[in-house]
Image (cartoon, rainbow, N blue to C red):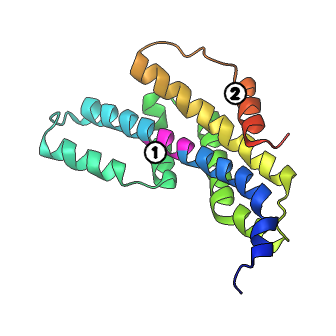
Amino acid sequence: MWLTSQDLDRMAVPSEELGKAVLLCQKFEATCKDIVSWFEIVRKLDEEKIEFLGDEYLSYVDKLHQFLLGESILTLRRNHGRIGISADELSILNQARISRNWIVHRSGLEAVFANGEIDNEQLVFHIRKIARGDFLVSSWSYEFHEKDTCNWKVEQEYIEMIVRWVQLI
């Protein structure tokens, strides 16, 4: 069935929250894919001794940039021991990926088919998982690019800031 103007009015409030949640998902995914690409490029240059900016290097970079989030995390999982990523960190990323998928693929449907309402408790659960994953990859990205230790915020403060921004508590 088509959406009616009444349906659209009912969905106005959760739409703002879901829009912010999707923005968080996109930011997490982009940062994760970017830093995983950098980790993997450095590893490949170091271990396989390929020529920087050579054809094999450029082809590999193109391949990495086409990965979806799950493929990026899987690549990191395969090589985590060689680049110092812990099993706990991989778990954080995988949980964030699962929550990202729920927000992107399911949360909007819940609002459309649940009389314009969303389950705030469930949404907060997923926002927290994504914010935790985003904090991790953002820390790695900062340290990689700035060559300095990240001490911008405490993880829990970052997560709460994100939840407040999405206006769920």
Q: Is residue 153 located in the magenta-colored stretch of the structure? A: no
Whole-number angstrom distance, CA of label 2 to CA of label 1: 28 Å
Count all numbered tags in the image, as a single digit. 2
Q: Position of residue 134 (x, y in %)?
A: 60, 36
What's drawn in magenta, residue-wise? 27-33
Q: Secondary structure at mark 1?
A: helix
Q: Position of residue 39 (x, y in %)?
A: 39, 33
Q: Residues within 10 Å of mark 1 (few under 14, many from 20)?
A: few
Q: Tell me the kind of residue under disc 2.
A: Tyr
Q: Main secondary structure of the magenta part?
A: helix
Q: Is residue 101 left or right of residue 26?
A: right
Q: Is residue 122 above or below residue 80?
A: below
| Mark seen at residue 78 | 1
Q: Is residue 83 left or right of residue 47?
A: right
Q: Is residue 86 visible?
A: no
| Mark seen at residue 158 | 2
Q: Is residue 74 above or below residue 101?
A: above
| Mark seen at residue 52 | none
